[in-house]
Amino acid sequence: MFNKVVIVTRKTRLEGLIERFNTRSQAKFYIEHAGGDFAEYEREDDAYRAALDILRRSLHFELPIQLVDRSLVPTFQFQKEDAVITLGQDGLVANTAKYAGAQPIVGVNPEPARFDGILLPFSPGDARAALARVLESKANVRDVTLAAVTLKDGQRLLAFNDLFLGARSHVSAMYRIKSGDRSELQSSSGVLVSTGAGSTGWVSSVFNMASGIARFCGGTGVNGIRMPWEDPRLLFVVREPFLSRHSQIGIVAGTLQPGQELVIESLMPSGGGIFSDGVEDDYLDFNSGAIASVRAADHPARLVVS
């Protein structure tokens, strides 16, 4: 089934600083001059490089190994014959899963003492055994529902945790929203659509805000909604909807059952955007005339858990 191992990596913070300041010494001067601990950046970089070295030396399955940096993932063509491993934090798993198709993903925690790694069940030393189970089709794989947004011109974007539709700055977004047989014009801080995996993430902060405001106004708190990773439903909320003569607040939250979709038509001449999982650089333009349809993706992400 597999003829290649793809290891998705990420640049460390130290590498990012060196790219910014051209040399290690200049990066060190900047951090220490600002009162920071440059040694912490070095320790993190050393740990990541050691983890990658362990990973590469242990994966002897007579298969070629290809390293792919996180920045290249959106344009990398994953094949059904690729065995995929990520080495980084949880976000690297989420961003890889959107593009890996049905390929099982082995999430490796480069530094278990530093990162909790909810999506990273394996240490560098455990990765060989996990990959062996994948190659033998014996791995325990957990499906994760993805969200998908499609524009009328065919452009498409997937989300592991959540989709954001709105203005790309802190101005109000103007749009028409349709859920089921209900439709209205809205002005808000944007619409957030969450998967089960994302229900404990960004969208939970919206419920936290609503709960705090409810208590401030003399009411009781608001319970957030948490869904398992496999839940086929999506949850959407409208952030800070504004009521005026031209904008309504009748549709502020809801769930999308399997097969249902949320339709949003942009009324913004410019500055509108759609991005997923907090990655603003990988986005779709969402300006006047664009109509976005959001629903659960046709296929789930597949994470190896044991």
Image (spheres, rainbow, N blue to C red):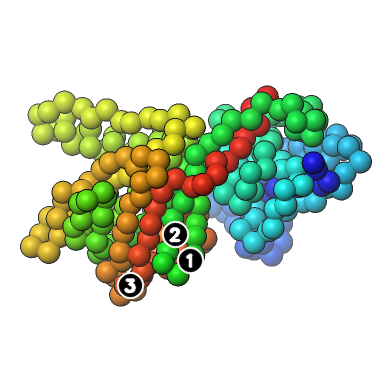
Q: Label 3, label 1: how many angstroms apart (C-alpha)?
A: 14 Å
Asked if residue 202 is positioned above or below residue 264 in the image, the reply reads: above
The residue carrying pointer 1 sits among few (fewer than 14), some (14 to 19) or many (20 or more) residues within 10 Å by Cα, namely few
Kindly identify the amino acid type of the residue bearing the numbered disc 2.
Thr
Query: Which of the 4 quarters of the picture holds residue 272?
Result: bottom left
Decide which of 124, 247 is in the foreground and name it. 247
What is the CA distance from the residue labelled 2 to the residue labelled 3? 14 Å
Which numbered dot is residue 289? 3
Residue on which disc 2 sits: 150
- Which residue type carries mark 3? Gly
| Pointer 3 with pointer 1, Cβ within 8 A | no
Per the rendering, the mark at residue 215 is none
What's the CA distance linking mark 2 and mark 1? 6 Å
Locate the N terminus by quadrant: top right
Q: Are marks 2 and 1 in contact (CB under 8 Å)?
A: yes
Q: Nearer the viewer, mark 3 or mark 1?
A: 1
Secondary structure, mark 2, is strand
Q: Quadrant of residue 289?
A: bottom left
Left or right position of 49 against 278 = right
- At mark 1, the secondary structure is loop
Residue sitting at x 31%, y 31%: 224
Percent x, y of residue 282: 52, 60
**Residue 44 visible within the image:** no
Q: Is residue 81 left or right of residue 225?
A: right
